[in-house]
Image (tube, rainbow, N blue to C red):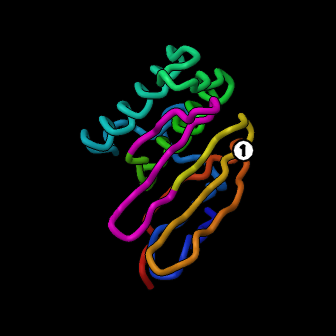
Amino acid sequence: MKHSLLMEGTAVGLISPLCEMPGVDGATPVSILSVPVQEAWDHLVDDLLRFRLLNEDWDGQGAEAPKAAIVDGVLEWVRQMRLYPQAITPVRVVPGVAGEVYLEWQNPSLCLTADVSDPAHAEWTLIVAEHPARHWVTDLNIPYFVSALPLS
């Protein structure tokens, strides 16, 4: 797996797996994931499925409904992330006002957001206290996921 430290001192990285995890048909056996972790992933998938039901002006202020291709791309990405037991579940997923979808990871030391405004790419923003914000883009065809990295 390709590990990429997001920022010095965060001990969180963006991982690009180079091979699938062992399991039935490439899936992680459910017994590996704790019930709370399974429930967190399930909740995330349920939220994404609800995004498909949003209409134009879903927020009463003119927001566009999330684009089906974007929701489907994020659903597939989440399904891929979920295959890796070391993947950190996003704390939330939210629809944007221009048809995009945001996934967010947060802890007391950082805020990481993946903005998916087209089905092929995620635009990342990392904010860590006392550091300038970082931005980059990844390809959604590669199943990147967020993971804790061992401290050396």
**Amino acid type, label 1:** His
As drawn, is 36 to the left or to the right of 28? left
Quarter of the image containing the C terminus? bottom left
In the rendered image, residue 111 lying in the magenta stretch gets the answer: yes
Q: Where does label 1 land, which residue?
A: 121
Q: Residue 129's x, y, as percent?
A: 44, 75
**Residue under the point 53% across and 53% down:** 113
Is residue 92 among what the camera can see?
yes
How many numbered tags mark residues here? 1
The answer to which quarter of the image holds residue 120 is top right
Q: Is residue 29 above or below residue 136?
A: above
Q: Residue 23's x, y, as percent?
A: 48, 39
Q: Which residues are magenta?
A: 92-112
Q: Is residue 32 above or below residue 74?
A: below
The residue lying toward the viewer, choosing from 120 and 2, is: 120
- Assign the magenta stretch its main secondary structure: strand
As drawn, is 53 to the left or to the right of 43? right
Is residue 26 among what the camera can see?
no
The residue lying toward the viewer, choosing from 2 and 60, is: 60
Q: Secondary structure at mark 1?
A: strand
Q: Is residue 18 above or below residue 115?
A: below
**Residue under the point 47% across and 24% down:** 59
Quarter of the image containing the N terminus? bottom right
Q: Residue furthest bottom?
A: 152
Q: Residue 76's x, y, as percent?
A: 59, 32
**Residue under the point 31% across and 39% down:** 31
The residue lying toward the viewer, choosing from 73 and 17, is: 73
Q: Is residue 149 above or below residue 113?
A: below
Are there few (<14), some (14-19), or many (20+) residues within 10 Å of tag 1? some
Q: Residue 71's x, y, as percent?
A: 59, 27
Q: Residue furthest left?
A: 35
**Residue under the point 31% across and 43% down:** 37
